[in-house]
Image (cartoon, helix red, strand yellow):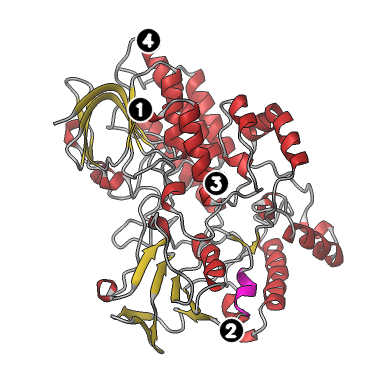
Amino acid sequence: MDQADVDIVIVGAGVLGINQLYRARRDGYSVLLLEQGGGVGGTWYWNRYPGCRFDSESYTYGYLFSEQLWRDWEWSEEFAGQPETERYLNHVVDRFDLRRYIRLGSRVTSAEWDEATRTWTTRTEDGFEARSTYLISTTGVLSVPQYPDVPGRETFAGEQHHTGAWPDSPVAIEGRRIAVVGTGSSGVQIAPVVAEQAASVTVYQRTPSWCTPLNNHPITARQQAELKESFTRIRDALAVAVAGFLHESSGRRTFDDSKEQRWEFYETIWNSPGFAKLSSNYEDMMLDPKANGEWCEFLEEKIRALVADPAVADLLVPDHGYGGLRPPFVTGYYEMFNRPNVELVSTRRTPMLRLTETGIETTDGLRPFDLVVWATGFDFGTGAMRRMGIRGVDGLPLNEYWADGPRTFLGVMCHRFPNFFFPGGPHGAAGNNPRYGGDQVDFVADLLNHARDRGERRVEVPLETERRWAATMEKALPRSTFVEHGQYYGTNVPGKPRRFLLNPAGRPVLLRVMAKTIEGGYAGFLD
């Protein structure tokens, strides 16, 4: 059996895994990164479906740990597509000579803590074994594709793919009858793209989302130069930005303006980039239901103006407030429904019964397809770690410790699992993930350095500290606008406990608790 002994084993070569690997090497640790895929990139390796792209500005999503890297790389678009993002992450790995520490094709099947030796033993599906002092899971929140509980998927004779596990070989689109199941972020991206070539596209929608324009554009040479010269300013601004974006607050409240002024302002917001619809909108839009309702009224007018068939528009208008579900940002989504080859099916009105050999059957009949696209989300937040066979003190399975939902500190570690960290995990982020995740990566790296400086080899968050973070999450939860269903609550996975998996307290609280922990010398963490 192959075996490696290192200071740190990292699992997952996505955005945060590469970042954690960079920090570990910079800080002088021996390290091995295990990645189950055939290449690096994580989400941006697996989600290679047509139309996949950022909805955070490219330069706010990338790494900020190197000014030279910032100057070397030029993003071609405000919101880069998947191929460019994958190239960027490979560039980073090679630019900092990290590939030699990465083992691809390594799906972790077990990870066990040994109290006597104070080490983790991690094993992979192909028989590889690694012993390490520390185990860091950077498997992310969007790692395990989730399929709906619909009978007959195995009987379908055509082709079917989940957007989160798209093949790296071309998938034929032209002239085919395509079903797109799901209208979350990936469904609304892929559907307009394939509709341009397919014989027909049928979109299966359970819950409509408030979609607004992404407003993507190429980055001009002048903007490239400005970005290069603004590294320090942008880095420092993003380090404290509440949601991890550069968008400026409007400084305005909804009903301080007349209705005419509000509609003019909403038009400006409609034409703004990506998440600026949230962060640059009226400051009370997400806090005051009446203010939220006004914005939704404006959006409904937009939907009805863009969609020619009033009956289709009726189905596309959500019955929840803006921010009740994760708002997607789109290009040509509503306009797509004016095409003669596109049909919208509401699975609320006509529920999906089964897949057959030839297609999808709902209560209003059977529709034949050549390709089914499952844009149905993920086993969010905990899915990957629940499948890794992680066992802590006294052989305690992580799945047992989290049987009623995840228990964490800062979304990065938990009691009874010493020397185990999971930046990017549940209860950590609620905005631009690489910015929140970068905070967590640095917290973990600094904690390990502190332990090394003290000559300690065992790090565990105290139970009371973990409980205080849980109380912080619970106290902040009423401020969340998310409706209590879907992947952020785990309700899309049969048998998964209903628990909110994001950080409702936000980044300022995360940073404040991190700072207080550091100032207190990580009291109680070291043994």
Q: CA distance from mark 4 to mark 2?
A: 69 Å
Residue type beneath disc 3: Glu
Magenta part of the chain: 333-338
Mark nearer the viewer, 1 or 4: 1
| Side of 189 where 424 appears, left or right | left
Mark nearer the viewer, 4 or 2: 2
Q: CA distance from mark 3 to mark 1?
A: 23 Å
Residue labelled with disc 3: 84
Answer few, some or many: residues within 10 Å of disc 3's Cα (few below 14, many 20 plus, some between 14 and 19). Answer: some
Query: Element type at marker 2?
Result: loop
Query: Element type at marker 4?
Result: loop
Closer to the camera, 37 or 149? 37
Answer few, some or many: residues within 10 Å of disc 4's Cα (few below 14, many 20 plus, some between 14 and 19). Answer: few
The disc placed on residue 57 is: none
Asked if disc 4 and disc 2 are in contact, CB closer than 8 Å, the reply is no
Asked if disc 2 and disc 3 are in contact, CB closer than 8 Å, the reply is no
Residue type beneath disc 1: Tyr
The disc placed on residue 454 is: 4
Q: Quadrant of the N terminus?
A: top left
- The image shows residue 250 at horizontal and vertical percentages of 77, 48
Point 61% across, 80% down: residue: 339
Residue labelled with disc 1: 101
User: What predominant SS class does the magenta segment belong to?
Assistant: helix
